[in-house]
Amino acid sequence: MRVLIIGSGGREHAIARAVSKSPRLTALYALPGNPGIESVATLIPGKADDIPLALEVARKESIDLTIVGPEDPLAGGIVDAFQQAGLRVFGPTREAAQLESDKAYAKKLMRIASVPTADARVFTEYAPARAYLASRDEPVVLKAAGLARGKGVLVLDDPAEAIVAAERIMCDRVFGDAGATLLVEEKLIGHEVSVFAIVDGQSIYMLESARDHKRLLDGDAGPNTGGMGAYSTADLLPESILREIETKVVVPIVDAVHSDGAPFRGVLFVGLMMTAAGPKVLEFNVRFGDPEAQVILPRMRSDLLDLIDRATRGKLDSAAVDWDPRAALTVTLASPGYPDQPKTGLEIAGLPMDDNRDDLLFFHAGIKRENGKLLTAGGRVLNVTALGDNLANARETAYAAIEGVRFDGMQYRRDIGIGR
Ligand code: AMP
Ligand code: GLY
């Protein structure tokens, strides 16, 4: 099979590495990929959300299957465009992708399908949002409804701060047009977990779960980011809870999307808070998590390409996935200034380019190669993933490996996988 991967982050590197092991693969391309992906794929320069270019590449290189990593091209309708052109692609249509690209839409479907989630009000104008916030004296969560790279959510314990923040989101548009609609949610308390299902339009296959660390700083302090680290263990969620999530969340929301007109095909990523009243949905995403993919995919022993191929042909009902029982943990190395204003162009030293250890993997994200040097090219630069017999061993291996990698102002959390 000739395969094209769309995207350039650590997630896409993890997908590319997993797909590259498939006996069914005959050629692998990435648009645009990164220097890490280059070790297993041919890179095509361009932008991940350039849909006409993706179509051109798929035709020119006789691609059998295109796998879309990030949300932007999905929200932009890449799957619709490929389907219209008669090309096979893995991901949801633009309409189904609204589950992620429009949090107000996701809330509406959750209400219709009785999916457990935080109570929320939706506002399209500032004055009523302000009046509502002024009437509250509990902590609130503000969410820009559109796509904001994981940064459009503010958890505010003081409602007075929330009024100022709502003005910045809705009037000053600090998250751009994503802030045209604002959700004001109740704050949920508990541990978070990221659950993944592969969906073929009809059948659902639940993958192993992961826990993400979204805040920038140790002890879950600082702003929300795209993700500063994650881990996945075989016992992260008891089987009974995973089944509860499947029956109370995944099945009803997939049905609700279908009834709304668009069968869901792709990865459904459910961000949940495990509250005292049971699991409640924080958000849906319509793709693999980043950095969750960097811990889940290294634990997948069976053929990812085969699984995705089945999903695009409506043949998931006969799928079976074999998992590595080891724990996996990843630490994100981020640029100075991330998440607000990441500084790029800094030289990265000490990054091994060979991938010959099965318990230590370096997934490239915001990295470019220039004149033979590796330079930072984005906010999240690298994911160092380690596997171990238990979480503590995996953590030790990952942090020991980080000691060898350097760039100016490198930021990372020292507490990934601790205290949970
Ligand atoms: P989201 O992009 O909706 O997943 O939100 C990003 C992060 O904000 C989540 O991973 C949580 O840490 C936090 N968050 C979102 N919604 C809530 C909520 N209702 N209660 C508490 N924390 C939340
Ligand atoms: N790690 C969260 C995300 O991929 O959105």
Image (cartoon, helix red, strand yellow):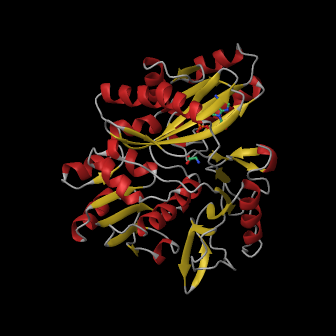
Give the percent coordinates (x, y) of residue 420: 76, 43
**Quarter of image, res 393:** bottom right
Query: At x 45% / y 22%, what residue is drawn?
Result: 108
Image quarter of the N terminus: bottom left
Marker count (numbered): 0
Q: Nearer the viewer, residue 267 or 23?
A: 23
Left-right relation of 270 to 339 = left
Left-right relation of 329 to 146 = right
Q: Residue furthest top?
A: 135
Query: At x 49% / y 59%, what residue is drawn?
Result: 301
Q: Residue furthest bottom?
A: 371
Give the percent coordinates (x, y) of residue 14: 51, 62
**Quarter of image, res 275:** top right
Q: Nearer the viewer, residue 186 or 299?
A: 299
Vertical order, 311 against 332 (above or below)? above
Left-right relation of 175 to 159 = left
Q: Nearer the viewer, residue 165 or 417?
A: 417
Give the percent coordinates (x, y) of residue 93: 32, 42
Vertical order, 215 against 327 (above or below)? above
Query: At x 33% / y 45%, what residue is drawn?
Result: 318
Query: At x 29% / y 45%, what residue is drawn?
Result: 315
Vertical order, 13 against 216 (above or below)? below
Decide if residue 406 is in sight here. yes
Left-right relation of 321 to 339 = left
Decide if residue 93 is in sight here. no
Q: Nearer the viewer, residue 224 or 62?
A: 62
